[in-house]
Amino acid sequence: MINVGDVAYNFSLPDYTNTMYTLKQFRGKRVILYFYPKDDTIGCTQQACCYKKFYKEFLELDVVLIGISIDSTESHAKFRNNFDLPFLLLSDSTKEVCEHYDVLKEKQMFGKKYIGVVRTTYIIDENGLVEKVYEKVNPREDAEMVLKYLKK
């Protein structure tokens, strides 16, 4: 588990165009990393659209917003285009970053157990340290909750 005060794991992941991004390249800015289970599902769409709704306010705070899931870059391209999402969606198809951020957990659906991404949001400070962690977030409330925290 990554805790508040820990150095955030530096990753290198592709976006929907296969452009690679690292966490380190955003040093000097606060970064929101929100991990979500799956593109184009009800909860994940609600969460992404809420972040889109408040995106200008995040920009005004000079915050970088990044959504991460284990979906492919092609899936991210479709999801991004379907909902006109203005922020980065990065693909962790190897699950390495999700493992480092401890968001892969046992889940259950229709009586079957599996390992999946638990909706979790990290705020990384300007120096690359974990500032805040929100676990098992509500997709409809996550963006506004993070925005309120950043504004205080």
Image: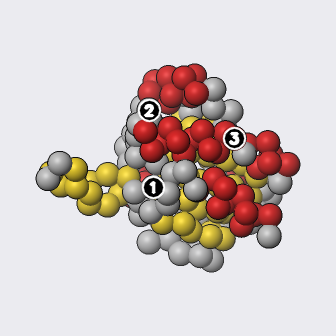
**Whether residue 107 is visible:** yes
Q: What residue is shown at x 41% (from left), y 37% (from top)? A: 41
> What distance separates the C-alpha of mark 1 from that of mark 2?
14 Å
127 is higher (above) or lower (below) than 96: below
Q: Residue sitting at 22 percent across and 50 percent down?
A: 109
Three-letter code for the amino acid on which mark 2 is drawn: Asp
Is the residue under label 3 in contact with that under label 2 (CB below 8 Å)?
no
The mark nearer the N terminus, 1 or 2, is: 2
Instruction: Tell me: residue 94, above or below residue 135.
Output: above
Q: Residue 69's quadrant in the figure?
A: top left
Q: Which residue is mark 2?
A: 40
Q: How many marks?
A: 3
- Residue at left offset 69%, top offset 41%: 53
Question: Distance of mark 1 from mark 3, alpha carbons?
Answer: 19 Å
- Given this view, does label 1 or label 3 mark the residue nearer the observer? 3
Q: Which residue is mark 1?
A: 119
Q: Are marks 1 and 2 in contact (CB under 8 Å)?
A: no
